Image: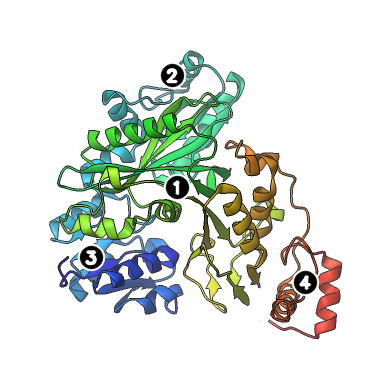
Amino acid sequence: MPAVAKVLVANRGEIACRILRACRELGLPTVAVYSQADRDARHVYLADEAVLLGPAPSAESYLRADKVLQACKQTGATLVHPGYGFLSENEHFRLACDEQGITFVGPSAQAMHQMGVKTWARDAMKAAGVAVVPGSDGPLATLQEARKCAENVGYPVLLKAASGGGGKGIRLVEKEADLGAALEGAQREAGAYFGDTTIYIEKFIVNPRHVEIQVLADRHGNTIHLFDRECSVQRRNQKIIEESPAANLSDKTRLAMGAMAVQAARAVNYESAGTIECLVDPDENFYFMEMNTRLQVEHPVTELVTGVDLVAEQLRIALGEPMSVRQDQVTQRGHAIEVRVYAEDPARNFQPSPGPLRVYRPPHGPGLRLDDGFGEGDVVSNFYDPMIAKLSAWAPTRPQCIARMASALDSFEIAGISHNIEHLQQVLASEPFRTGHYDTGIVKTLAPLATDPPDDDVSAALAVLLHHRRAAGQASPSTAGPHVFTQESAWALAARLGAVRR
């Protein structure tokens, strides 16, 4: 790999840190970009150089393609790795990189274009002989057209934004009377988030699983899959727990899905890392849903079970080298689970909870991997996604992996903000998850978390006491770990420890 290649990482947070570490292992010099809000962020200090893009709002910093390209020119960076989000699936940014002789770490603009709009992706997959979820042949022009399509495929149906992602621009419609209002709502949300009000219809698969296949392809004609990830634990269509291999999926279906994913990637001449997302019904019939033309948030679980460094492979491919693995060399070993730790309040409908991490002590130990971009004392900004960290666990078997993750979450100490650790523990402890017989509705089956979180001072005081008790080998005050406590006990604890100030 050429030592002169300098990589600019056009992202922030944990994914920027992840990419920067991969570059360092490969001996590639690096450049970070940052907003004013991220001036003291970890990724800034991990890079060899750093360039300020602009004010905190992403529209004035991380989404400014012109400023990113100017940073490349200023530093002499010859590659741009976009991570995920921001500019990662922006075909216009990819074209601008091509025009300026900068190598974009990812697929071609044509592949992004074809797979980035879901209606076009469906057409491409149908032409390639890939099964897609029954639905409209293209975008819906009128409510009358939507009614006709919904009647043909049968209720319930999903209205989906053609340019959507992250669970936005989606409406479930169970009967014709609700279709008009749902269409207006989906169009309004799609326009606000994506600048595109185009909507299409898919048949709603009852009790579906969300299973995706990781693919890699280089420019030497090699395309492989790296097996499956189960991503069915979601809230508001946003993934929060992922695992690999998918539980209770037959080897026959697993291999068939892998072959389909390779077929789909080849159909659009795909290059780099990408993900084919599928819906799987209770009878293991599977349907292409969409392709993410970038690295996925949940890529660590694939890396843990296959031993393949996906970011390193992306960099090799972008530099024109063949990928370092063949299909017959890729196997799944053991089991991996990833949880997304968010600054949000499950007791208040998962409302974001930005603020300072007064206490931040992640777990460490055998079989654990932490991807984060924060340290104790850092501030979770209200300008960006509220994810604090991704915690992954690996073990030889799924039950052992669940136990390892549960133990790790029990020792994860966070104070100063609300977080979703108790909610993650609740999912892991549920019977559907433990048995592996769950679908995308699993979160809705759980009892709501009604305990109001204490204020910052009390939460910090509790975490301090727990830290000292663990250091002294004492038991936690709650068998459920440091994240389950009552307002009364927290106030009593604060009184015992004395004043803890902001």
Of the pair 439 and 169, the residue shown nearer to us = 439
Give the residue number, with chain letter if any, for mark 4. 475
At label 3, which amino acid type do we have? Answer: Leu
Q: Is residue 347 above or below residue 353?
A: above
* Number of other residues with Cα within 10 Å of mark 2, as a class: few under 14, some 14 to 19, many 20 or more: few
x%, y% of residue 199?
43, 32
Question: How far apart are the two marked residues, 2 and 4, measured between alpha carbons?
Answer: 63 Å
Distance, label 2 to label 1, CA atoms, is 24 Å
Quadrant where the image shows the C terminus? bottom right
Residue at screen point 63% across, 43% down? 433
Mark found first going from the N terminus, 2 or 1? 2
Quadrant location of the N terminus in the rendered image: bottom left
Q: Residue at x 65, y 61 (%)?
A: 407
Q: Residues within 10 Å of mark 1 (few under 14, many from 20)?
A: some
Look at mark 1 in the image and give the residue it sits on: 193
Position in image of residue 52 (x %, y %): 33, 75
Residue tagged by mark 2? 145
Q: Is residue 112 above or below residue 395?
A: above
